[in-house]
Amino acid sequence: MSLNTPGYSLTPSSVKAALPTNYLTDFNFLNQYLPDTYEQEFERYGNRSVASFLRNVSAEIPSASDLIKWSEQGRLHTKYTAVVPDSVLGSDTALFSIAGSGVCVFRKNQTVFLSSESGTASAKAVISKVGLGDLLADDQQFEVKFYTAAGSPFTQTIETVTAFVYGSEFKKGAVGMSGSLEAQNSFFDVKPIIIKDKYSVSGSDMAQIGWVEVTTENGATGYLWYLKSEHETRLRFEDYMEMMMVEHVKAEASSAALAYLTQSDSNVQPGGAGTQGLFAAVEERGSTWSGGNPTTLSDFDAVVNRLDKQGAIAENTLFVNREFSFDIDDMLGGVNAAFAGGTSFGLFDNDKEMALNLGFTGFRRGYDFYKSDWKYLNDATLRGGLTAGNVNGILIPAGTTSVYDEVIGKNMKRPFLHVRYRANEAENRKLKTWTTGSAGGAATSDLDAMEVQFLSERALCTLGANNFVIFKD
């Protein structure tokens, strides 16, 4: 059995001229019958706005600069993977070469744990030489001496090894540790972007009255259609402000968008034009689950194991589309032993007078996960129903994190997700609205119209993106 759903219009009804459906254009005075009309407009799509996500999960903080920079802590410990051993089985001393470029940060007399990536063997050893300072071939090598009499359990160049330092050991009377390590930070930046929109209506159309009483999501009502259109422009612009923070990407160095959006007399900041939205930040610096939704506890165990390796934030919220929400409900319902023979999940004390609850708002599996529907992912005119490049949900950590703000010059507590908008004592560009023209009370020009301008300049800061997970098809 298939569900035949009514179609929906993807063509906007907001145009520069009055629609013929706004008025009784077919009224015939020769017809003796008076039509029975419904004056009030019916809201068949409910609340059409999707701007609610960032209001719930982020803060808004003013910024007085063209560039917003911050630094995030690096790892405290160093682990090397794909390390190549240069030793024969059973040798007392072994030489290892780290993969890639860069200097090996291990130091002499540190104790190291070595684990075969094929799962065949592991060993512990003390580092006896590191890099060119100890006359090795290059700075990517370190030499170890094994603690076991059996020597090296690794076969020369056959398998790769994972290595990390767990301490150090010195003989009596030895000099101290050679060399020191500097703290490593990661630096990130975003630039605010300018978003604009406009609504225009002529003075003549402002004096026209309709027969339908209109209403909008913000409560505006009346028979003047230009008021409805102006309010809808405002609501649409508020949606754009949020969607830009979620969807936007930086223009790459050789892209046509960068050339189009860059003023010829200005200096282009590093990273290209535009700002980085939430999805792009998580895809670049966070974790991506692809290949369908996680539908079993073992799938979420993989997510938990990933979070263990990151910030281990105790509470997280899943903002999901309808399909993902149902998958989580079915997964949690299936955990109940009586599920196969009935519907006793959700409200476990159901009776005939109660509505059966077949949904869940959250669960605990290593961490606390709260589930919330995200209207933007379900809206048929936006991301709802997409097949290519679709996002089914995103995991966002709760709370705040400490970062070094390079503009202020000190450590600050910031929400993981927050919006920075341009503002100072003279100008606030969080959401600017002004009216121009010569109609509707405006008296700024000889234009026989009223123009309502909208402007915002803002950027989204995604701190600790390694703690986020995006779920994609």
Image: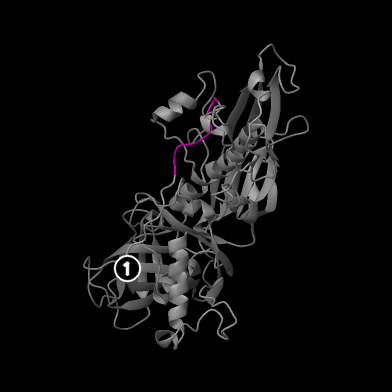
Check the image and report above or below for 199 versus 400.
above
**Residue 76: % across, % down:** 53, 63
Question: On the rendered structure, is 279 left or right of 94?
Answer: right
Q: Please identify the quadrant where the N terminus is shown.
A: bottom left
**Residue 209: % across, % down:** 66, 28
Report the predominant secondary structure element of the magenta stretch: loop
Residue that appears at 53% across and 67% down? 175
Where are the magenta residues, as a range? Answer: 9-17
Q: Quadrant of residue 183?
A: bottom right
Check the image and report above or below for 59 versus 274.
below
Residue that badge 1 annotates: 161
Amino acid type, label 1: Val
SS at circle 1: strand
Q: Nearer the viewer, residue 390 or 34?
A: 34
Q: Which residue lies furthest to the top in this view?
A: 446
Check the image and report above or below for 470 versus 85.
above
Q: Verify whether residue 11 appears in magenta.
A: yes
Any part of residue 197 in sight? yes
Question: On the rendered structure, is 16 left or right of 294?
Answer: right
Q: Verify whether residue 433 appears in magenta.
A: no
